[in-house]
Every structure is written in structure tokens, then in C-alpha cells.
Amino acid sequence: MTGKTLLLNCVLLFAASVVFSEDVIMEVKPNPVRKGYQFVVSLYIDHDKTTEISVTPPKIPEDFKLVRGPVVRSYYVALDNGKTRKKTKVQYTFLSLKTGRFILGSYHIKAAGKEYDTEPVLIGVGIYKNKRFYIPYEVSWREADTSYYVGQAVPLTGQVVNLPEILIFEKVEVSSPTSGIFTRIDDPGPITKEQTGNEILYTVPVAGYIYTPSREGTVKIPGIKISAEGITSSSRTLTLKVKGIPSGIRSTGAIGKFTRRFFLEEKSSEGSGGINLHIVIEGNGNLNYLEIPPPEGDGMTISGGKDEQDYHGTINGFEGKREKVFTLLFSEPGEKEIIIPPFPFLDPVAGDITTLESERISVSVAASESGEKADPFDSFIPEDTAASHLPVKSGRYMDPASYLWLLPGPLVFIIFFVKTRKRFLLISLTLLVLTSSFLGAGTENKGSRLFLEGNYGKALDLYVTELKEFPDSPSLFYNAALCYNRLGMIDKAVYAANTARMYNPFKEEYSSFIHAIEMSSGIEYSLQLEKSVYPDIFLFLMTIAVNGAAFSGVIYLVRKRNFFLILAVLLSVISIIAAGFLVRSSYQWKQHYGVVTHQSEEVKKIPHEHSDPGFEIKEGELVRVIGSSGDYEFIENGIGLKGWLKKDSLLLLGGDLDPLEVLATAK
């Protein structure tokens, strides 16, 4: 191709574009526009006969309201030779209803046998704030659906859409929903872009979460708030509908796609030594929620189940594996068969339930040297309670008089500050020491010897007697739970053990004992108590900190040393923090729970004796008490199933209830 030909082609292409641009010109004024104000879309068409022109508008964004149009009229353009040329103008007037960036699509025009399409236009709608005009970011939640199941891992992505350029967001905030588990994930997903005409808009994911609902009904996910370049915007609240767990997967609660494998650490075992059976569930879904059913077998007892987790959150749910290690004990030697129960799971996309069928594995159990049968509770022995009582009296935080101990230190400081006399220093020290009267004293545990001798009834009597003097001792409740368990009172054992765990939530032995009872009794859906420190601890800490801060302030006034000023400020901060935890802990302790007292109890759908049954719960199962009606309590179990249960079928726990009195009055 010669240079002249190339130059001629370039000129012709330029001329064609000029002709096209002059035939139809589109104009949007003003752009950007202020929210609540009008803007006008004008089409200038190089044709003089208005009757021969037809315009097909694009789909208008729902956040624009057509106020007027199309208005078609003629207008004249002055030419260079002094003459005028008649053309046609078509106008549409819109009202902007919402802030953001919107694509106004192509207008299709027919004139004098020719057809034209305008280029899409990006229209910005903003607001004025602090004398500054800006367009807020369009923040939204991106979810796959709006209807889910209890226990399902629901991926949620907070995103900003319709960005003309990619931004780095400085701050992301979102509150957790009132129920369920809300987990942030590291990778919220890829940035995507959409090109319409000459316009390119980006969708930027700013934060990813996985929400696991714990109860059915309507759930509100709070809006997500983001900030960048001095602009803060929030999304709307997301509403999800949560359905109950399908009956076909009630044994596992598994929702997703999973595979299963299992293995034994040893192929043979002594009768009292036990073996470890590993059941591994791998895949993508609600690995944080699903349950792995325990194995079954004649003459076999499960003494514990260690749960090992190795998964991470993705935009598609939790991916990885859950591994449950069951310690199996056999009462008799010989060839034994272990049954791996079926594992059903729901595919939320296809809506189908898939069941990994039951499998069997054989193991050779050798006779133990001692010939004794294995006992899953041999490792649990009473604690020494000589110095284990809490340094507070149970329920002080509910007594207004207890808060009077906050006054001595500040009062002495005020008096000393006003009088400026050093003799008040001795008074303030005396009053500070008096606040230590909160501290209690322990007593020697006298029941351990009787328990180890197998005299469980007398040991229990001693522990109950001690509890009357020290009603807040977790060790005494734990020791009583051991006795109840040996006496075959499963419900009272679970109740006492959970009471111990409430008073000392960080003692893993209490949780292990509760788990051992659940495994040996076949309790699958028991509720797990949240860890919460008893409120009196924070009241005691706040009392010491307030009076200590006042005492340090008095010393500072006398000695003028900055150390005591810093100490006073530090103790004041500690007192404020303790007050916050006191309020939070008090709220948690107001919640009520219940332990089922009968071996097998039907939960009703409505609080009536002749109501249809909803589901069954077992003796020793811990449930949350939500409300009551007549002779029934409205309860929720560990997998979110809810219904009505008779009050006399529960040992109530929590709130202002006296656990010792509940145990004494129980049948």
C-alpha cells in the first residue's frame, strides 16, 4: 500500500466519523447531576422533517424518573455561507432519584431511511456535603440466593459497583448479625469489569464473610460501611430467609459437597487400652457446623471425640476437612466390627440429598492383662477444693449494696483534696484494705477419699454440704457431677458439670467430662455453652481498681510523684474496662438453659398436650430456653431446632436461678 493510498484511507475514515457524529449528536446536561434534580438528554438529528424521525429509547435505569418527553422540535443552525440549516432536536427530561453512577444505553434513531445508535453515556448522580459535591460509592451485599438453611455456610461479599477506576478502600465496617456465626474470610474474590460502549466500570469486592445461621426465620445482615478518599458510604441491610434443617440430613446437618474416609491408628487393641478411629470429612460447605456421627458397635464404648479442623473460608464456603478422632473401648476381647454410620449431606445448588452409605471395619481386640472392662470415666477424678473457691459471693453483682464499695476510695480522695491533710492518707489505706472483704476462703475437700473408695452417695452428700457454704465453687459442682454420673443420674450430672463450666469456662476438664457423658449416652445435638466469666469477678476487679485509683491519687497529692498519677490513670482505665465487661457478662448470665430430665422426650410444635410432635431429645441434652407458655418452655437445641417442652422435663440453669436449689428439688 502506497503512502498516498494510506493517507486517503485515513482521510475517508475521519470524514465518515465526522459525518456520523454530525448526523446525530447526543448531549446530557448537567452531568453529573445533583440527587433530586432534573437533567436533560438531548438528541440533535441532522434532518429537517420531524415527522420522518422515530426514536426508540433504551431501558431507563429505575432510579431515573421520566418527567417529560420526548419533546420533538425543529431548530436552525447558521452556516458559514450565511445561510441557515433546519435540523431536529429530541429532548427527554429525567429526575434523578438515587445517588450513584448509571449507564444510559443507546438511543436508536431512524431518519430518512437511515438508522443510528448513540453511544451509551455514564451519568453520575451526587450530593453536596460540607460545600463539596461528590458521588457516593454504590455499596451492596452480593449473595448467591436469599433463602438458606440452618447451619449452611452462606458466602457474603461486600462490594462497590460501577466504579470508573479501581480504588483502595481505607476502612471497612460491618456489625455481626444478632444470631448465627459471622466469619470474615481473607479473599473476597476478583475484581470484575464491564464495558458498555466507551465506558468501563469496575466492581471491586472489599470484604468477604461467611454467615452460618443458627435458627430459622428472617435474618437481617447489617449494612456494610466503606471509606475511601474522604467519602463514606453504606449498603442496605440484607434480608435472608432461613429454613429449618431438612429431615434427611438431621443426623449431620451437612450442607455442601463432601467425601469421607476413615482409618484406625492400630488394627488391634487391648480391652482396656482403646484404639483411635479417625473419620475425615473433606469438601466444600459448612465444615464449621456439620456433625460427624459417632461409630457404633456391640460391646463398644466411646470415651471421647477429638475434633480436628483444617479448613479456610472462601467465596464459595468453607473448604478443607474436619477430622473426628474417636477413642473406642471394648468390654470383651475378640474380633469386633465397627460400623461407620451413613453420612447424608445436602447439595444446596442442585437441592439433592446425597448419602455416603454405612461402612464396616473389623478390629481384633486382645484381652487385657487385668481382665477389667474399660471405663470411659476412669480418667475423671474429683478436684482438690481447698483453694478453688472464687473470691466473690455468688450474685453480688445483682445486689445494689455491693456497689457501695465503689465509694470509699473516691470519697476519701475528694475529702483529702478539699482538706489537704495527710492524716486522711491512713484512712484511705484502711478503707482500701476493707474492700478486700470481698475475698472468700476455701475449705478442705473431704469427699475425694470417699469417691475414690466407691462411696459415691456419701461423697455427694459432703460436696452438697460444702456447696451450701461455697455456692460459687466450680470444683464442688464438678465433683458433685462426678458423683451424680456414677449414681446413674445423667441429667443431674450434666446440670452440675455445666454449672461448673459456667463458673469456670476455661477449665477444659469440665468440657471433656460433659463430652464424655454425651458420647456414652448417645447425645448428639446438645447445646454448647458460650464461655462467659461470672459477673462478680468483674465487679470485684472494678471495686479494687476504683479504690486503688483513688488511693494512688491521694498519694500523688501528698508526694507529687508522677508514678502515682500514672498508676491512678491506669487503674481508672482498668475500672472502665471492667465495668464494660460487667455489663456484657451480666447480660450473658441472664440467659436461661435447661437440661432434659427424661430418657426420651417429644418436643411439641405448639404448647399443647395433643400437639403434633416436632422432634425428640434425650436425657441430659442441654437446650436454650427462649420463652414459656403455661406448663411449657419454648426451647432450642444445638442444631437450631425449636419447639415446646413441658417445664417438669427440664432442670433450668442460668439467670438468677440457684443451681443447688434446682438440684435439691429435682426428682
Image (cartoon, rainbow, N blue to C red):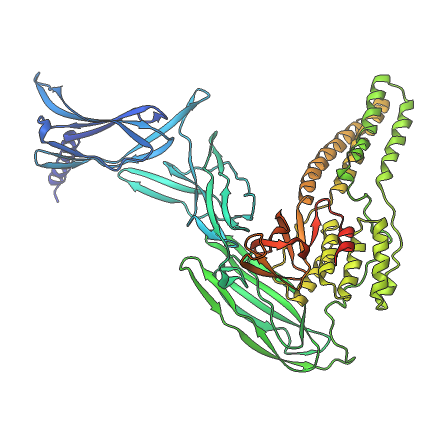
Q: Is residue 114 left or right of residue 149?
A: left
Identify which residue is drawn at 32% across, 39% down: 200
Residue 75 % position (x, y) = 14, 21
64 with respect to 399 (left or right): left
Q: Is residue 352 left or right of residue 520?
A: left
Pinpoint residue 334: horizontal percent, then vertical percent: 67, 83
Q: Quadrant of residue 562?
A: top right
In the image, 13 versus 199, the foreground residue is 199
Q: Quadrant of the N terminus?
A: top left
Total numbered circles: 0
Q: Residue drawn 59% across and 57% down?
A: 603
Taking 581 as reference, is 280 above or below it?
below
Q: Is residue 596 visible?
A: yes
Q: Find residue 559 and report its image quarter.
A: top right
In x, y percent, where is residue 406? 79, 31
Residue at the far bottom in the pictured view: 334
Above or below, comparing residue 42 to residue 388 in the picture? above
Camera-side residue: 156 or 443?
443
Query: Is residue 29 in sight in this rendering?
Result: no
Instruction: Determine whether 36 is above or below 451 in the image.
Output: above
Quadrant, the C terminus: bottom right
x%, y% of residue 64? 31, 31
In screen coordinates, is 35 left or right of 640? left
Residue visible at 50% across and 48% down in the picture: 217
Q: Residue at x 23, y 37 (%)?
A: 58
> Closest to the observer: 165 or 92?
92
